[in-house]
Amino acid sequence: HFNDYFNTALNSINDNIITIIAGDFNINLLNTENALVEQYTNNALQNSFIPCITIPTRVTYHSASIIDHILLKTPKHLIHTKVSAGNLVTDISDHLPNLLFIDLLVQTPKDRPMVRLFTPNRVNEYLNNEFNEKPLITYTNDINVKDNTPQPTFSEFNENISELLNKYFPLIKQSRKQFKDKPFITNGIKESIKSRNTLYKTYLNYPSEINESN
């Protein structure tokens, strides 16, 4: 009954994902003449699961067996993925620990960068309050420039302009839509795409030679 249930479970697994089944199955893959072992192996292979452990996982003075299994199934687009598997030789247990390495390129998620939005509303807000803000450089530090000691002046300017930027144009996370844009997709290209889509929609709604030529 185990083989029947096992085959049903394997058959229900999605073909488009990497699947690893591992455990102590207590089924000796070296016992090739046993009909149940043969059925177990056939069930795995017929469902695209490859037994990765092919050397004994339990060794005694009088016997050797492969009863600890790692079954691997990869989707078609990853069929050429490099896989390494084996056992660790250690006396931690009477079963040798199994290992499996899959050489995959894992894409790490990228955080959206922080940006400043210089929108018309924000710019107008700054312009309306510009005269109420303190000067970027005070009179004292203006004199320092003339005395050839610009560092205090620059420090004050940098601090004040940073304060203004954070007040009127604070850093915010870039929108998901902008984050997905490719660097080479300029605003001009976006407008062209929008215009093309509008013309195509017009042609679909009102088919004519003129609309087709547009």
Image (cartoon, rainbow, N blue to C red):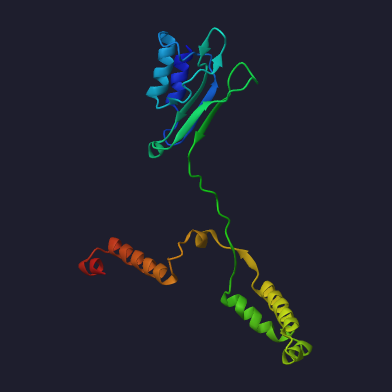
**Whole-percent x, y for residue 82 in the image:** 44, 36
Exactly how many numbered labels are in the figure?
Answer: 0
**Whole-percent x, y for residue 159 in the image:** 72, 76
The quadrant of the rendering that contains the C terminus is bottom left
**Whole-percent x, y for residue 213 in the image:** 23, 68
Residue closer to the observer: 145 or 178: 145
Q: Is residue 135 left or right of residue 118?
A: right
With respect to residue 72, does 136 lie above or below? below
**Whole-percent x, y for residue 157 in the image:** 71, 81
From this viewpoint, which residue is outermost toward the right? 140
Q: Residue at x 55, y 50 (%)?
A: 109
From this viewpoint, which residue is outermost toward the left? 209
Residue closer to the observer: 44 or 153: 153
Q: Residue at x 72, y 85 (%)?
A: 150
Q: Quadrant of residue 127?
A: bottom right
Q: Residue at x 29, y 60 (%)?
A: 204
With respect to residue 186, does 53 lie above or below? above
Residue closer to the observer: 183 or 128: 183
